Image: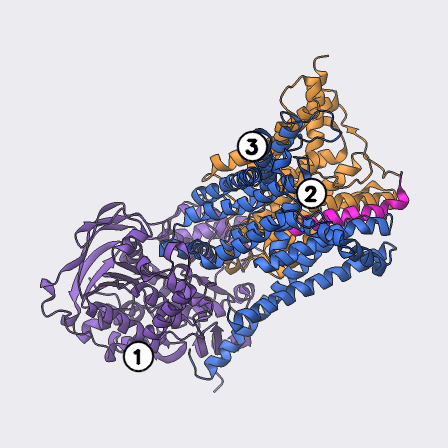
């Protein structure tokens, strides 16, 4: 019986992690190529909105997630047009897009979902994996999740493989580290950055879609509640490595899971300190790990 | 006559950068199996031209033909597909990736997109073995020495089996032995039918290695000659034009310079270089009041590192730096300035000026507290404006007014602005690094005159240049640096015209 | 200012105005798509924002908490630094101000209020100095650090409000009201406009003077224009970076203080719905120029105030159209400036060729 609470904690930490993993893996790809997305939260929010919309309209979860990816990718496309095309500053564009998407999706609740009031989009059900889900504690926690949670976990080795084991991944790193050199190697830096950025938007969008479509099925104002910023922090905390970012996300969501159940667990610490923990941890990590970890050299530069 | 078209033909290529015409209707051709050297002073337009050939810049006019067929410009990918390889002066390597990753990347995105990774690795190893270029393939590029990085670049180009291979100043950072090996590799390649373009300014080596030589000056082709038909002196004259002839060194600064007061003493100074730059070891020299001392040497011999350390831009690790007998080694830049030091950095765009700020503001940044431009931390706009107008007049800076952003000035006027800013303090010691790099004749002359006047006024002037002609025209005395050490010293008044040519080639400079 | 400077300012204004018009047009399309009459909607907004003395005062007060951080952000941008954490500095400024007003000595106006506002500035400055130090001495980009500190600041303030400083019997987490002596007095009868406006206008003039008329301003512009060259020239680059970010934070902190003493009278959870982020947009829309920033802040204030009218005028449409217009205006501005830059670069290269071709080598 004592195992119930740890199981629940791990299970919810992993469930909370899925949207963040999608977003963090997207951001990782994009940052490796040299594009920073302060609007990662906006991408998630857009994905949550369009994903809900698509799922409601079609009644299909698959269409919902495709819609979510498209929503995130659309935000990425605006960012790309401004920054990669017109060489605007990536930070400003990101800040502005966050404001824009929060405004647009809030506006859209009334405009789009008004007729659907009370209706919820279809939502994902947990898919226990046979045998594995029977393992005590771990099995319940790890293997009784929605399919997209497994997918999120699979993106981590996939992104690692892409970045470290494929020529495209090497080229991606080249574009983010030394765009000038990359260009004279024949790498089309601009195209590669566009591709990385769109991939980031799509992944973040799917992460946002996960929030709604594996949750309550309804879009509410600012449903991401700043999760994009946590994903951004996780990439930094994870030192621009996929596994590092995954560990960071799991660390952050474990704290979140504890915070949600703080009362049950008899934790006296004010919850605000748990909520700020990811940001404090990232700041401390940045301060301590400098030299050994650093962002791609050309991050945010538009060179 | 129905001869085949040349392997490569550059036809009337022009390229302008803001304020300067880097290439002006260039015509150049290259045959298979030939080593064609491209020489000229810094800023003559060699690197720009090769950049255009390789697609790094898009030409404003003209075209490039490979085997007689025009090649799309402005795309390195196209150049690579046409069999062009480029070993750049600033290596195009990704510092954080390993040697092999760089080679794979360079090949897969180059001409070998369809070649498997394993095949590339095999080719790399074969080339490394054939030419005796041993490298740790798993080391990250940033951990390699400059010479080793060049090996990576060379291998990267050779893996693609280029038909046209361009090398930009390949000998500059190599030891004599390494250079000799490189020349034999190039000859080997040419014999196998590759066309090689060699950018250089070591004239002796150029003549020894190349079949033909094309000389660029101020963006134009001055001559294309067979290497067998010219000697070092003739090439040197073509390269520098009239400057060396018209500006002969002045006589000794003081009637008896040895008796003049020593203003700056550098004693056993060592400076750790950044990765990729040469460290400075145990350099000692002295500059007297009224004297111009030149530091000669090939690019990358440690002279820039040294002068930056003297200016306070980078720390001196050991040794002493004395100004008028006081050790200023541990002082900050501002404190050195207050004691009468001025510095003209090597890279004016990067280190010299604040581009978006106005000319007046840039000039004010170098002013002394006693100039009264900002009493109590409050700027006096009128005084700043007056200060600027006076300097614009005195240094002949051509600008629409003191209020224009300094970045909009031409290169020559930017350099004049730096000199104006630094010389406005009436400094006692002036450190000038590449003071006329990339400038036209008139601007060069104006800057030389400014430095000479400063010396006549009694300042000690230390000039770093890789342009020996410039140093001979300017300096009373020369020291030569090689590999971070001072390897020789000459009085310019005692050097003959023949020796000038030899020294231009970097041959027996020491 | 020279003629060319004036022409440049006029051109900047034209870009900002054009971007705003495009944003309004886009918002009109959105409203129409949502089944609303854009003309009626915009009339409602204008009416609510400017329809009466009270409305104008309300617009001004809505501009205030955006104006002050925007001035600070512009100052940091002059030094080439991104203070995207003004939102957090607003909160710590408000908290410090509240602490002085609640627990400090009960001083008469304007001493007490002054002291509380100084505390607000100091707290904002300290909060922003942390990323400054990390940037200057450890080379860590201020973009991520200022942003991360926003959420730390908000949670810290929330804890103070819900914990040690919580007032009893309140439906919404808040501290007790600060003593009346600390409140900023109203200065325009019939409106909510208080003395904070004077503080803000003073701050606008002050930042303008700092940038154009002080050595500090010249030096931070130098660092912002070319950090490397500034170091080579001998400017104290690191200390300037810390100082510029701290100064930037001080203005954001002041905004928090003015909001507490002028409007709310106490520290409220979530009192700033993103003023610090909007301020980034305002700083850019105002082209970093104090007068332009005041205008842009008033515009944002009017949109915010007017949006309230929209909700009433056309039921069902959320007032979220205001931030949409704000963000679109800046996005269009970025696009316009970027496009103009690309065109200028091409034209410059062409004219350089023409000049050189004519034999004039400059």
* Name of the residue lying farthest toward the bottom: B1
Asked whether disc 2 touches disc 1, contact meaning CB atoms under 8 Å apart, the reply is no
Shown in orange, the chain is A
Task: Return the residue nearer the eye: C330 or B384.
Answer: B384
Q: Between marks 2 and 1, how big is the CA–CA gap?
A: 68 Å
Measured from the top left, where is residue A174 in percent x and y? 53, 51
Other residues around mark 3 within 10 Å, as few (<14) / some (14–19) / many (≥20): some
Q: Between marks 1 and 3, how big is the CA–CA gap?
A: 64 Å
Residue at image mark 2: C273
Tell me, for residue B241, which label it has, or none: 1
Chain C's shade in the image? blue
> Could you tell me which chain the residue with mark 1 belongs to?
B
Q: Which residues are magenta?
A: A96-118
Chain B's shade in the image? purple
Residue B203 in the figure: left or right of residue A20: left
The relative height of residue A84 versus residue A118 in the rendered view (above or below) is below
Other residues around mark 2 within 10 Å, as few (<14) / some (14–19) / many (≥20): few
Residue at image mark 3: A281
Tell me, for residue B342, which label it has, or none: none
Q: Is residue C34 visible?
A: yes
Residue depicted at 76% across the width and 45% down the height = A68
Measured from the top left, where is residue B330 in percent x and y? 27, 46
Considering the numbered disc 3 on the image, is that residue within a helix, a strand or a loop?
Answer: helix
Q: Nearer the viewer, mark 3 or mark 2?
A: 2
Residue B232 in the figure: left or right of residue A259: left
Measured from the top left, where is residue B453 in percent x and y? 23, 71
Q: Magenta: predominant secondary structure element?
A: helix
Q: Is residue B107 visible?
A: no
Residue A21 located within the stretch drawn in magenta = no
Q: Quadrant of residue B423?
A: bottom left
């Amino acid at each position: 019986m004592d195992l119930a609470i740890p199981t629940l904690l791990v299970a919810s930490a992993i469930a909370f992690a899925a949207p963040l993993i999608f977003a963090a893996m997207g951001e990782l790809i994009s940052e490796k190529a040299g594009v920073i997305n302060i609007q990662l939260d906006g991408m998630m929010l857009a994905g949550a909105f369009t994903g809900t919309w698509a799922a409601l309209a079609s009644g299909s979860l698959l269409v919902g997630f495709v819609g979510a990816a498209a929503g995130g990718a659309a935000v990425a496309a605006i960012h790309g047009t401004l920054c990669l095309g017109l060489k605007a500053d990536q930070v400003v564009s990101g800040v502005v897009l966050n404001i824009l998407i929060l405004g647009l999706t809030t506006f859209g609740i009334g405009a789009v979902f008004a007729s659907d009031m009370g209706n919820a989009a279809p939502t994902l059900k947990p898919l226990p994996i046979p045998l594995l889900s029977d393992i005590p504690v771990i099995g319940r926690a790890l293997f009784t999740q929605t399919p997209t949670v497994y997918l999120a976990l699979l993106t981590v080795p996939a992104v690692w493989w892409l970045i470290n084991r494929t020529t495209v991944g090497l080229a991606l790193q080249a574009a983010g580290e030394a765009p000038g050199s990359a260009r004279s190697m024949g790498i089309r830096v601009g195209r590669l950055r566009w591709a990385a950025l769109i991939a980031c938007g799509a992944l973040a969008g799917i992460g946002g879609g996960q929030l709604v479509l594996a949750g309550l099925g309804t879009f509410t104002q600012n449903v991401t509640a700043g999760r994009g910023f946590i994903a951004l922090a996780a990439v930094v905390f994870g030192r621009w490595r996929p596994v590092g970012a995954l560990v960071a996300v799991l660390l952050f969501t474990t704290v979140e899971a504890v915070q949600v159940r703080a009362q049950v667990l008899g934790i006296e610490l004010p919850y605000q300190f748990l909520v700020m923990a990811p940001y404090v941890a990232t700041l401390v990590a940045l301060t301590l790990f400098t030299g050994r970890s650093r962002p791609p050299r050309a991050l945010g530069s538009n060179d | 006559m129905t001869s085949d078209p040349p392997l490569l033909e550059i036809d009337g290529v022009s390229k302008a950068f803001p304020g300067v015409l880097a290439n002006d209707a260039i015509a150049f051709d290259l045959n298979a199996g030939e080593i064609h050297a491209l020489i000229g002073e810094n800023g003559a337009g060699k690197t720009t031209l090769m950049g255009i050939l390789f697609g790094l810049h898009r030409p404003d006019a003209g075209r490039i033909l490979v085997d007689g067929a025009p090649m799309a410009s402005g795309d390195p990918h196209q150049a690579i597909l046409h069999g062009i390889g480029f070993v750049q002066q600033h290596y195009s390597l990704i510092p954080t990736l390993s040697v092999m990753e760089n080679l794979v990347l360079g090949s897969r995105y180059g001409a070998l997109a369809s070649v498997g990774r394993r095949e590339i690795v095999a080719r790399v190893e074969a080339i490394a073995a054939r030419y005796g270029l041993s490298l740790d393939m798993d080391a990250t590029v940033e951990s390699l020495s400059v010479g080793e990085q060049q090996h990576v670049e060379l291998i990267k180009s050779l893996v693609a089996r280029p038909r046209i291979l361009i090398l930009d100043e390949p000998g500059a950072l190599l030891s004599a032995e390494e250079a000799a090996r490189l020349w034999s590799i190039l000859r080997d390649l040419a014999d196998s039918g590759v066309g090689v373009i060699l950018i250089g300014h070591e004239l002796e080596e150029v003549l020894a290695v190349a079949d033909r030589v094309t000389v660029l000056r101020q963006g134009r082709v001055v001559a294309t000659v067979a290497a067998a038909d010219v000697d070092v002196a003739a090439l040197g004259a073509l390269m520098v034009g009239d400057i060396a002839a018209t500006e002969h060194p002045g006589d000794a600064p003081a009637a008896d310079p040895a008796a003049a007061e020593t203003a700056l003493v550098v004693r056993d100074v060592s400076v750790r270089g950044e990765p990729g730059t040469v460290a400075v070891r145990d350099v000692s020299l002295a500059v007297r009041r009224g004297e111009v001392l030149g530091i000669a040497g090939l690019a990358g011999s440690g002279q820039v590192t040294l002068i930056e350390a003297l200016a306070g831009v980078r720390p001196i690790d050991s040794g002493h730096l004395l100004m008028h007998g006081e050790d200023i080694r541990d002082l900050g830049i501002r404190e050195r300035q207050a004691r009468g030091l001025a510095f003209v950095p090597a890279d004016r765009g990067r280190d010299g000026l604040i581009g978006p700020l106005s000319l007046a503001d840039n000039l004010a940044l170098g002013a002394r507290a006693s100039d009264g431009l900002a009493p109590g931390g409050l700027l006096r706009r009128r005084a700043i404006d007056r200060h600027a107008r006076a300097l614009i007049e005195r240094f002949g800076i051509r600008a629409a007014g003191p209020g224009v952003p300094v970045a909009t000035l031409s290169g020559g006027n930017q350099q004049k602005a730096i000199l104006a800013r630094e010389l406005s303090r009436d400094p006692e010691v002036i450190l000038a690094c590449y003071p006329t790099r990339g400038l036209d004749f008139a601007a060069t002359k104006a800057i030389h005159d400014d430095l000479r006047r400063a010396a006549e006024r009694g300042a000690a002037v230390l000039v770093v240049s890789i342009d020996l002609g410039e140093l001979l025209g300017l300096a009373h005395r020369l020291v030569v640096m090689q590999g971070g050490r001072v390897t020789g010293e000459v009085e310019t008044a005692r050097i003959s015209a023949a020796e000038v040519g030899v020294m231009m080639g970097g041959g027996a400079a020491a | 200012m020279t003629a060319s400077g004036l022409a440049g300012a006029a051109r900047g204004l034209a870009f900002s105005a054009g971007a705003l018009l495009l944003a309004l047009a886009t918002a009109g399309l959105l409203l129409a798509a949502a089944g609303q009459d854009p003309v009626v909607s915009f009339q409602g907004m204008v009416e609510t924002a400017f329809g009466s003395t009270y409305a104008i005062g309300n617009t001004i007060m809505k501009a205030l908490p955006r104006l002050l951080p925007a001035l600070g952000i512009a100052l940091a941008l002059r030094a080439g630094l991104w203070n995207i954490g003004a939102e957090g500095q607003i909160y710590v400024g408000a908290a410090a101000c509240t602490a002085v007003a609640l627990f400090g000595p009960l001083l008469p106006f304007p001493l007490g209020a002054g002291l509380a506002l100084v505390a607000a500035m100091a707290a904002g400055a300290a909060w922003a100095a942390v990323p400054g130090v990390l940037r200057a001495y450890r080379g860590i980009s201020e973009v991520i650090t200022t942003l991360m500190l926003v959420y730390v600041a908000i949670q810290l303030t929330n804890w103070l409000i819900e914990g040690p400083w919580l007032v009893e019997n309140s439906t919404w987490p808040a501290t007790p009201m600060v003593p009346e002596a600390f409140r900023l007095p109203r200065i325009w009868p019939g409106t909510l406009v208080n003395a904070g406006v004077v503080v803000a206008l003073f701050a606008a003039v002050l930042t303008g003077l700092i940038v154009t008329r002080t050595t500090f301003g010249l030096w931070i512009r130098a660092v912002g224009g070319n950090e490397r060259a500034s170091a080579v020239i001998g400017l104290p680059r690191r200390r300037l970076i810390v100082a510029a970010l701290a100064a930037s934070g001080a203005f954001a902190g002041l905004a928090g203080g003015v909001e507490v003493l002028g409007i709310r009278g106490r520290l409220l959870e979530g009192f700033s719905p993103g003023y610090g982020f909007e301020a980034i947009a305002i700083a850019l829309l105002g082209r970093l120029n104090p007068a332009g920033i005041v205008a842009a802040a008033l515009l944002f204030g009017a949109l915010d105030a007017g949006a309230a009218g929209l909700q009433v005028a056309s039921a069902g449409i959320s007032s979220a159209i205001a931030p949409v217009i704000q963000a679109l205006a800046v996005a269009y501005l970025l696009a316009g400036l970027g496009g103009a830059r690309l065109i200028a670069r091409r034209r410059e290269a062409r004219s350089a060729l023409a000049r050189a071709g004519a034999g004039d080598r400059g």
